[in-house]
Image (spheres, rainbow, N blue to C red):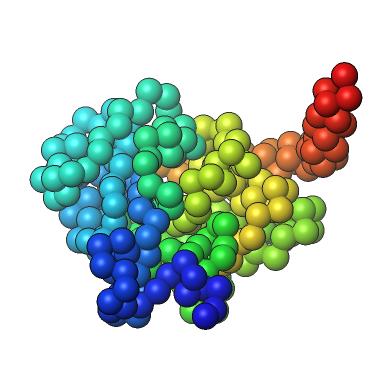
């Protein structure tokens, strides 16, 4: 039996009644999956987001960024069991961190609330994780991916910043600033997120590499925002991403020394 099938088995296997959750006609999983959706005034877009979410999801965590429209009410009407968490701070990074803390599933999937992501792709992310990956990273520029919602300046900025991360951290990413990702919840202990803005995806991508986690890119198509306007400011947020890259680069050596230091401290403690 392959390593993938040790974690994910046929949904029609008579030996596993009740334990596994059917994902497709060829795949069933045991780990519960949580989907985190940060949202602020996205009531008009949520129907498009929720209708693509597969029904085998364990829970949906909506992080409400102090919406002034009917975001929360619409979410509860669309997904009666939705877990609504009020965001206390500001920014996408802060919202995601808040949502991650509220998750109970073993696998966490990040999905934007603007209707640009297709929830049916979640099966590809989960399949990668149960097959051995630690972090399933969505990519609009991997073979099979695409985007309908990037201006030329954003594409150029993403390409330059992605190349910088690859060169400085030894990654082989094709995309950097994309918000559709999935990972095992235990990875949060390894990456220790501590940012508040749109740079959160970049920080995650850098720290999973620095932590030595196994990353698999998942081709994904980004669609146009359906209603409203994005809070993303290309130039301003681009500089924030660059700042994160430089900061992570500057403390890379210190982080590399940390496991060795901990091991020495542990050895001293045992000897005393």
Question: In which quarter of the view is residue 124 placed?
Answer: bottom left
The relative height of residue 250 versus residue 10 in the rendered view (above or below) is above
Q: Position of residue 212 (x, y in %)?
A: 71, 53
The reply, left or right, for residue 251 in relation to residue 158 is: right
Residue 100 point in image, percent of width and height: 43, 39
Q: Nearer the viewer, residue 112 or 161?
A: 112
Q: Picture quarter containing residue 137? A: bottom right
Q: Identify which residue is drawn at 77% across, 59% down.
A: 170
Residue 187 point in image, percent of width and height: 56, 46
Q: Is residue 267 left or right of residue 148?
A: right
Q: Residue furthest top?
A: 272
Q: Is residue 67 visible?
A: yes
At x 25%, y 38%, the residue is 83
Residue 145 seen in the figure: no
Residue at (37% x, 41% y) in the render: 104
Question: At which x and y percent is residue 120?
Answer: 32, 68
């Amino acid at each position: 039996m392959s390593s993938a099938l040790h974690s994910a088995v046929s949904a029609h296997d008579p030996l596993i009644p009740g334990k596994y959750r059917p994902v497709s006609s060829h795949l069933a999983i045991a780990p519960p999956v949580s989907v985190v959706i940060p949202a602020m005034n996205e009531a008009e877009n949520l129907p498009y987001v929720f209708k693509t979410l597969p029904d085998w999801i364990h829970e949906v965590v909506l992080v409400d960024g102090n919406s002034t429209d009917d975001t929360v009410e619409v979410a509860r009407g669309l997904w009666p069991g939705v877990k609504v968490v009020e965001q206390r701070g500001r920014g996408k990074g802060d919202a995601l961190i808040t949502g991650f803390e509220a998750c109970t599933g073993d696998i966490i999937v990040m999905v934007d609330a603007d209707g640009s992501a297709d929830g049916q792709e979640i099966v590809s992310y989960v399949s990668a994780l149960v097959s051995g990956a630690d972090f399933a990273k969505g990519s609009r520029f991997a073979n099979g991916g695409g985007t309908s919602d990037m201006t030329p300046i954003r594409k150029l900025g993403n390409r330059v910043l992605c190349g910088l991360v690859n060169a400085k951290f030894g990654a082989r990413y094709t995309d950097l600033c994309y918000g559709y990702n999935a990972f095992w919840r235990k990875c949060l202990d390894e990456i220790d997120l501590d940012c508040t803005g749109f740079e959160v995806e970049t920080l995650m991508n850098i720290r999973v590499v620095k932590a030595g986690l196994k990353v698999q890119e998942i081709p994904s198509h980004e669609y146009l925002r359906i209603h409203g306007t994005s809070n993303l400011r290309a130039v301003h947020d681009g500089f924030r991403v660059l700042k994160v890259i430089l900061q992570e680069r500057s403390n890379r050596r210190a982080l590399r020394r940390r496991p060795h230091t901990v091991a020495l401290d542990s050895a001293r403690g045992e000897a005393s």
